[in-house]
Amino acid sequence: MSTQPEASLQAEVNRLRLQLESLQVKDGSEPIALGNYLLARLEQLKVTKMFGVPGDFNLGFLDLVEDHPTIDWVGNCNELNAAYAADGYARVKEHSIGVVLTTFGVGELSAINGIAGAFSEMVPVLHIAGVPSTTQQKTKPMLHHTLGDGRYDAYIKAAENFTISQAILTDANTAAAEIDRILTDCMTRARPVYLTLPTNLVFEKISSERLKIPLSRLPPPNDPDVEAFVLDEIAKLVDEAADDVVILVDACAIRHDLRSEVNELITKTGFPVFSAPMGKTAVSEKYERYGGIYVGSISHPDIKEKVESAKLILSVGSLKSDFNTGNFTYSIPPSRTIELHSDHTKVQFAAFPGIGMKELLPLLTERLQPCSAAARKIPVPDFTAIVPNEANDVISQAWFWPKMGTFFKPQDVVIAETGTSSFGILDVPLPEKSVFVSQILWGSIGWTIGSTLGAAFAARDIGLNRTILFIGDGSLQLTVQELSVMLRHGLKPIIFVLNNSGYTIERFLHGKHRKYNDISNWKWTSLLGVLGDEDGTLSKSYTVKSKAELEALLEDAAFARADKIQLVEVMMPMHDAPRALVQQAELSGKTNAYVAI
């Protein structure tokens, strides 16, 4: 197994080789259709699923996708859901990327909210837009799917705002280099990228020589002199703190493929470790030195005290959004903070651009390992969730989430919709090697249905356990169609629909008794039959109205096996909410107070 410096060096060599290939392609290489070149690169990146909707400007490329031996076309109900699915796929299959294919104009604009969410939350997704031929783009006829005013670049300009890199293919001779460039950006920068694929270039023959050189997902190497200086400065601060150091792990540790490096850091140093909401399951929640979720003032008092009283905070991959920080209530001054990021490091008030944590963390672990004996003497709060003994049979939020904690198994993929679910599950420890998926920063209501589709495919690819979704009745109504796609492809998630008669998070933010937060009630247990399970053999649905009914279901071995798609309607009080959501809503209400005029 290569070391981190060796891997980084090889990645840099491959980057230089690809640059050289761009200048002079070797003669004698076997020609390949441009569309197949793209698919070959995706196959190298372990992509097995492509999401999207067929349209007349991508149908030729879809012939190649459908005939590909290892990449399957999923086919979604709409492009927004397809983008959500590509996002969920990429989050769970961490060493790959998500891919969504749309048609020109109407398709890509429909997908753009999903792409924006992936950008916001740093998820690597490739958006391929099938577009008119290069000749039509030059002559600008009034084609369908255009704005009717000749602006063929309008959608490209839109995509530039929501993707980190774009390749607008116009010439087969440069297409391979352009594809490689954006795919490398997608992986190394963990953000969506955008590719236009003109109809007349899909079958154009190009050289396959570049396919012999693998693309790298590693960032450029750190400057060794600056890196050495940063290591010295961090070591000094740790020494001055007399080993009273807390590690705080956040989302970018997951997004930038740092799980193994972070695990080495926490196990070899023994420092207490906590995570932010977006970093949940970045480290094992069963690790004895793990203390739980830190969310600023919303944190449990023992967690808040432990983190904020530490002499030094080692922050790994932080994303300081409002819902991720308890509405910006972190009480951790820069003078006591070291921040490690993918492309820079902050040591107190000093910033070091270009010093990324992928290379820095292994060196830091080696440097700080002697602190282990003293660090392990520092007490860590127990991260547990006790099921309360309530004197009624109503399924309350306070009872529901700890109870669900007893149902989870190692390697489950647990997905929580924005709002009640994402807040409720924070205080519940998840088993070893579980994967938690949520969209706390972008917060697009209904995102989890599409995301569950992609996540379930990814979980199946890499051998994870069950896929379990928690979603509110209001959120499910936005994107419910993708349940039909799950049925068509034989996916078997367990879907808990929290029926509390509307938009609970919105009620607590504003308008608790307003009609605009109400929704129409659906016959939830009939959904799967309507959406594809016509004879009732592929799915099973339940309604639970009491603690006793839910407990009986969770203890049912057949239900727990998850050998078919299952939907559970959970009846809950309208104005009940998890503790953390209530506190967050109070803080947000003060910040965004409406003033009557």
Image (spheres, grey):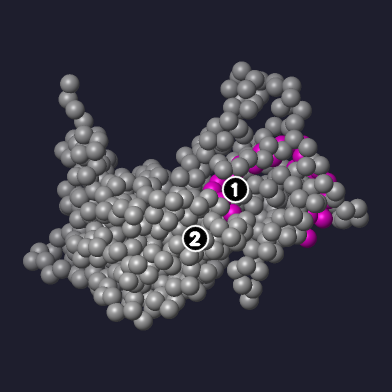
Q: In which quarter of the image is the N terminus?
A: bottom right
- Give residue 413's position: percent from left, percent from top: 42, 65
- Judged from the image, the secondary structure of the residue bearing numbered disc 1 is strand
Mark drawn on residue 276: none
Residue 1 relative to residue 227: left or right: right
Q: Does the magenta stretch include residue 189?
A: yes
Q: Does the magenta stretch include residue 143?
A: no
User: Which residue ends up furthest to the right in the rendered image?
Assistant: 28
Q: Front-most of 579 and 309?
A: 309
Residue at label 2? 230
Tally the numbered discs.
2
User: Which residue ends up furthest to the bottom in the rendered image?
Assistant: 373
Residue at label 1? 126
What amino acid does circle 1 point to?
A: Leu
User: Which residue ends up furthest to the left in the rendered image?
Assistant: 391
Q: Front-most of 416 and 70?
A: 416
Q: Is disc 2 surrounded by few (<14), some (14 to 19) or many (20+) residues within 10 Å? A: many
- Judged from the image, the secondary structure of the residue bearing numbered disc 2 is helix
C-alpha gap between disc 1 and disc 2? 34 Å
Does label 1 or label 2 sit earlier along the sequence?
1
- What's the residue at 17%, 48% (across, down)? 575
Residue 140 relative to residue 338: left or right: right
Q: Front-most of 260 and 139?
A: 260
Q: Tell me which segment is drawn in magenta.
A: 188-212
Residue 529 relative to residue 195: left or right: left
What amino acid does circle 2 point to?
A: Val
- Give residue 197's position: percent from left, percent from top: 69, 40
Q: Are marks 1 and 2 in contact (CB under 8 Å)?
A: no
- What's the residue at 31%, 53% (across, down)? 333
- Give residue 508's position: percent from left, percent from top: 20, 44
- What's the residue at 70%, 22% (across, down)? 140
Q: In this rendering, does residue 547 appear at all?
A: yes
